[in-house]
Structures are given as C-alpha cells and as structure tokens.
Image: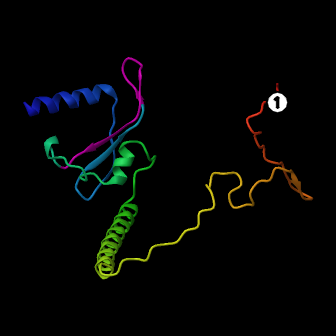
Amino acid sequence: MAWAQSVFSALRRSLSKEVKKKVGTDRFGNKYYYIPEYKNWRGQTIREKRIVEAANEREVDYEVGDIPTEWEAWIRRTRKTPPTMEEILKNEKYREEIKTKSEDYEKEKLLSKECNEGHPAPPLQTQIKGHASAPHFGKEEPSAAPTSTGKTFQPGSWMPQDGKRDNQ
C-alpha cells in the first residue's frame, strides 16, 4: 500500500510542476523544503509552500519542541528567510543562560525567604494627600478665585451654591 502511495505522489508532483527545494535540516533530523509559487495545468496560481518532513515518520510521535522555534517561525511565515545554524546556536545559548538565571533567582528567593521568616518587615507609613487621578494631585488645593502668573493661567474652581437655584 505504501509503494502505491509513493508512486501516486511522484506522478502528481511530475504533472503539477511542483519543485521542492531543500532549504535545510535541523539537529533533530527534520528536513525543510520550499516550493515557489507556480501555475498549475489549469492556469491557477498556486502560492508558495513551506514544508517540513519530520524525522519521525508517524504523526503520533510528534511532540511540541520537535521543531526548533526558528524553523517553526519560518514554516508559519512569521519570518521571511530560513534560520542559519549560527542563529539557532546563538538562540539556544541565550535560552540556556535565561534558564540558569531563572534557577539562580529562585534559589536566592528561597534563601531570602528562609532568612526573613523570623523577622517580619516593618510596616510602611504613607501619607494620603488625595487621589492621583485628581487634576490637582501634587499641587495646591484649587481655589475659588482664578490665579495667573506670567506664563500660566489656573481658572478658579466651581463651587455649588447652597441648594439655591439661579433660575428662580
């Protein structure tokens, strides 16, 4: 059955003008191919394709992480050019550095937590001066009379009257 499928796919490729160009391989043994845009026998334009042939023949053996992130970005068209081996090695080294820094941070966090368990931190004293979204936060309280300096003008604040209406 498998030989019939391979013969049929070879016949289809020969009739469709579909030409695979090998772009590269990764450290897992996956092979990456590029098929440029072409016109089929009906005159329809078929857009470019980017294909990966997995090292594991069965799809059930595929797991997340079997394709490096750089190659996956190329397959999904988030990047235009395929990754170079130098770039992949540089990114792997960077990931390892981040992993070790994260582990070191977790160790330091545990050590500081153990040291500070017997001594609670003193409470902080804050001074409340109003809400930060208020237009006068950090400034003097608004006055009823307008104020002006040479370059700025601060209009006076509106103060409601004691329940009296002006329209009466």
Q: Nearer the viewer, residue 27 or 66?
A: 66
Q: Is residue 119 above or below residue 37?
A: below
Describe residue 113's horizontal placement relative to residue 137 as left or right.
Answer: left
Q: Residue at x 27, y 49 (%)?
A: 31
Judged left or right of residue 5, residue 151 is right
Q: Is residue 99 visible?
A: yes
Q: Is residue 138 above or below residue 143?
A: below
Q: Residue 118 placed where, x, y %?
A: 30, 81
Find the magenta span and give its range.
38-55
Coloring scheme of the render?
rainbow
Residue displayed at 34% across by 48% down: 72
Residue at 14% x, 42% y: name it.
60
Q: Secondary structure at mark 1?
A: loop
Q: Is residue 36 magenta?
A: no
Asked if one can make out residue 58 in the rendered structure from this viewpoint, the answer is no
Q: Amino acid at mark 1?
A: Asp
* Residue matched to label 1: 166
